[in-house]
Image: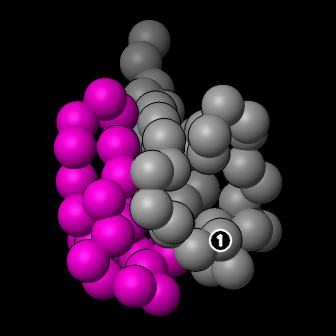
């Protein structure tokens, strides 16, 4: 298992898990979130190719509309 941090909370995942997998498991639409991966913004096109690694820090912010 891989240990990492998501939004400041300790998490674990299976090896080979991608950022896209994390979003799917949390029922978050990729087009409605902004992801910061180890302090850097991550482009949506990279979600499926970016593996979660031991010690990673991931921040996921969900966009909400209002009016």
Q: Residue at x 45, y 61 (%)?
A: 54
User: Horizontal and vertical percent for residue 32?
Assistant: 52, 48
Residue 35 % position (x, y): 58, 44
Question: Is the residue 22 above or below the residue 17 in the image?
Answer: above
**Which part of the image, by quadrant, shows the C terminus?**
top left
Viewer-proximal residue among 51 and 34? 51
Task: Identify the image's colour scheme: rainbow, by chain, secondary structure or one colour.
Answer: one colour
Secondary structure beneath label 1:
loop
Q: Which residues are magenta?
A: 1-27
- Classify the position of the N terminus by image quarter: bottom left
Using the image, determine if residue 39 lies above or below residue 66: below
Magenta stretch: includes residue 15: yes
- Which residue does the numbered mark 1 point to in the structure image? 50
In-front residue for pair 8/42: 8
Q: Position of residue 64 (x, y in %)?
A: 42, 29
> Which residue is painted at 50% across and 50% down in the image?
56
In the foreground, 40 or 45: 40
Can I make out residue 31 in this image?
Answer: yes
For the point 30% across and 82% down, which residue is it?
A: 14
Neighbour tally class for label 1: few under 14, some 14-19, many 20 plus, Cα within 10 Å: some
Q: Is residue 62 visible?
A: no
Residue 40 covered by magenta stretch: no
Direction from residue 62 to residue 35 in the image, left or right: right
Most distant residue in the top direction: 67
Residue toward you, 9 or 60: 9
- Indicate whether 7 appears above or below 48: above
How far across and how far down the image is residue 42, in percent?
A: 72, 49
């Amino acid at each position: 298992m891989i240990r990492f941090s998501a939004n400041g909370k300790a998490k674990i995942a299976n090896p080979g898990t991608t950022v896209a997998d994390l979003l799917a498991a949390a029922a978050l639409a990729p087009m409605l979130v902004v992801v910061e991966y180890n302090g850097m913004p991550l482009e949506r096109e990279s979600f499926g190719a970016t593996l979660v690694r031991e010690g990673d820090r991931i921040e996921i912010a969900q966009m909400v509309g209002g009016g």
